[in-house]
Image: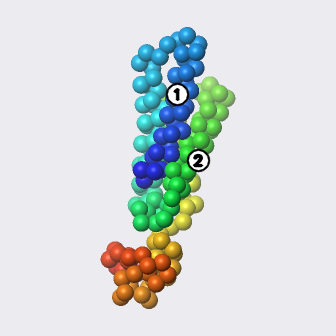
């Protein structure tokens, strides 16, 4: 979950840094606006994304969000991808529509929706399958290890099989 949040945060903090740079270049100065931008453009959408990811993982356990699965940088890349989609969609909406929607609400909504769509297409953790290699472990529960990759089978996974 932390890698997912870091991926999101990298994109949103970059957007804030670009906004601050543009403000300085135009001679407007930064003032307290940078902290407001950091909160509304970076912190709130990331928090919304983490909440959505936690809810999806609670209802439908995902392999990409599991601590035991060897996922590498995939959660980070999912966070980056969802945030880039959010910036593109929300930016296009802000430019095209003149309807007054608070930036934080728009970014949180689009971030939640894009992350929800991405996570619902991710691979699940199935009962009776090894979390590392997806091997059927129902016949080898007594050994306590997956015969394919050697990963330990937790008691939670054993109880989910039967």
Q: Earlier in the sequence, mark 2 or mark 1?
A: 1
Q: Is residue 1 above or below residue 131?
A: above
Q: Quadrant of residue 25?
A: top right
> Where residue 70 is drawn, which disc sits there?
none
Q: Residue at x 43, y 62 (%)?
A: 66
Tell which residue pokes out farthest to the top in this image. Answer: 27
Where residue 10 appears, as percent x and y from the top left, is: 51, 39
Helix, strand or loop for disc 1: helix
Q: CA distance from mark 2 to mark 1?
A: 19 Å
Disc 1 crowd, CA 10 A, few/some/many (<14, 14-19, 20+): some
54 relative position to 21: left or right: left
The image shows residue 17 at horizontal and vertical percentages of 52, 28
Q: Nearer the viewer, residue 97 or 149?
A: 149
The kind of secondary structure element at disc 2 is helix
Quadrant in which the C terminus is drawn: bottom left
**How many other residues sit within 10 Å of disc 2, few (<14), some (14-19) or many (≥20)?**
some
User: Which colour style is shown?
Assistant: rainbow
Is residue 35 placed above or below 140 in the rendered structure?
Answer: above
> Given the current orientation, which residue lies at the most extreme front position?
150
Q: How many numbered dots are placed on residues in this image?
A: 2
Q: Is residue 143 left or right of residue 12?
A: left
Q: Residue 17 or 122: which is nearer the viewer?
A: 17
Q: Is residue 105 visible to us here? A: no
Q: Residue at x 34, y 79 (%)?
A: 159
Indicate the position of residue 6 as horizontal and vertical percent values. 46, 45
Task: Residue at the far left: name it.
Answer: 155
Which residue is denoted by mark 2 in the rendering?
Answer: 81
Label 1 belongs to which residue? 17
Residue 78 in view, yes or no: yes
The residue that appears at 67% across and 29% down in the rendered structure is 96
| Image location of residue 57, percent across then percent down | 44, 60
């Amino acid at each position: 979950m932390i890698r997912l949040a870091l991926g999101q945060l990298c994109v949103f903090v970059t957007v804030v840094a670009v906004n601050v740079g543009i403000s300085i270049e135009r001679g407007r100065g930064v003032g307290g606006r940078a902290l407001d931008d950091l909160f509304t453009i970076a912190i709130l959408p990331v928090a919304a994304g983490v909440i959505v990811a936690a809810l999806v993982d609670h209802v439908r356990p995902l392999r990409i969000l599991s601590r035991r699965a060897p996922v590498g940088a995939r959660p980070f890349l999912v966070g980056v991808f969802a945030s880039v989609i959010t910036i593109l969609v929300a930016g296009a909406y802000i430019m095209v529509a003149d309807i007054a929607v608070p930036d934080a609400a728009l970014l949180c909504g689009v971030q939640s929706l894009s992350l929800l769509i991405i996570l619902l297409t991710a691979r699940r953790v199935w009962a009776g399958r090894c979390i590392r290699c997806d091997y059927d472990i129902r016949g080898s529960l007594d050994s306590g290890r997956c015969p394919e990759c050697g990963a330990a089978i937790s008691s939670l996974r054993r109880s989910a099989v039967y």
